[in-house]
Amino acid sequence: MGLKDISILEEIGDLYHGLLELDQALIAYKMLATIDPEYPEGLKKYAEVLEDPRCRDQNIDRAIDYYKKCLNLINGDANKTDIASRMERLYKKMGREHEIRDIQQYLNQDRPSG
């Protein structure tokens, strides 16, 4: 692909993802993440495919890394809580519970402070 337009790449990835052509979706989302590493939705979509067990190139550690980048860039408490919840699940799956403390503040955002 000689594509550089992020909206086209994202649409291609979304179409492949919807068809469960996850290896093709992964290629499009990886290109998207490479071209625009500051676009949190693209990073999130790349991480979602990376963690999917149906993806031939599943890589949970890499998915966690991309979720971390996304967490730092994405706006909105609900979005941050969603990403942190995904990370928490993956940390537990990988036996990395000790790393949950790094995202605990986002997991507790919906609780009143004080």
Image (cartoon, rainbow, N blue to C red):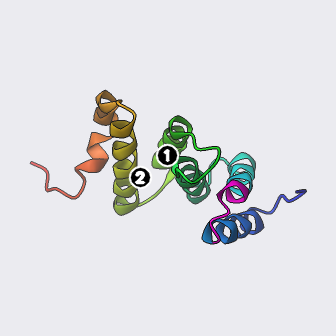
Query: Quick one: 12 or 114, which is closer to the camera?
Result: 12
First in residue order: circle 2 vs circle 1:
1
Q: Where 3 falls versus 108 (above or below)?
A: below
Dividing the picture into quarters, in which one does residue 4 lie?
A: bottom right
Is residue 15 shown above or below 47?
below
Above/below status of 20 relative to 84: below
Local secondary structure at mark 2: helix
On residue 67, which mark appears?
Answer: 1
Res. 41 mark: none
CA gap between label 2 and label 1 equals: 6 Å
Identify the element where label 1 is drawn: helix
Q: Is residue 51 magenta?
A: no
Residue 83 has which mark? 2
Does residue 34 appear left or right of residue 114 in this picture? Answer: right
Residue 55: percent from the left, percent from the top? Answer: 61, 51
Looking at the image, residue 81 sits to the left or right of residue 37; the answer is: left
**Mark 1 crowd level (few <14, some 14–19, many ≥20, 10 Å Cα):** many
Position in image of residue 63 (x %, y %): 53, 43
Residue 47 x, y percent position in the rendering: 55, 49
- Magenta highlight range: 19-25
Name the kind of residue labelled 1 in the image: Tyr
**Residue plotted at (74% across, 67% down):** 12
Q: Are marks 2 and 1 in contact (CB under 8 Å)?
A: yes
| Amino acid on which disc 2 is placed | Ile
Going 68% across and 49% down the picture, which residue do you hit?
33
Q: Position of residue 37 (x, y in %)?
A: 66, 47
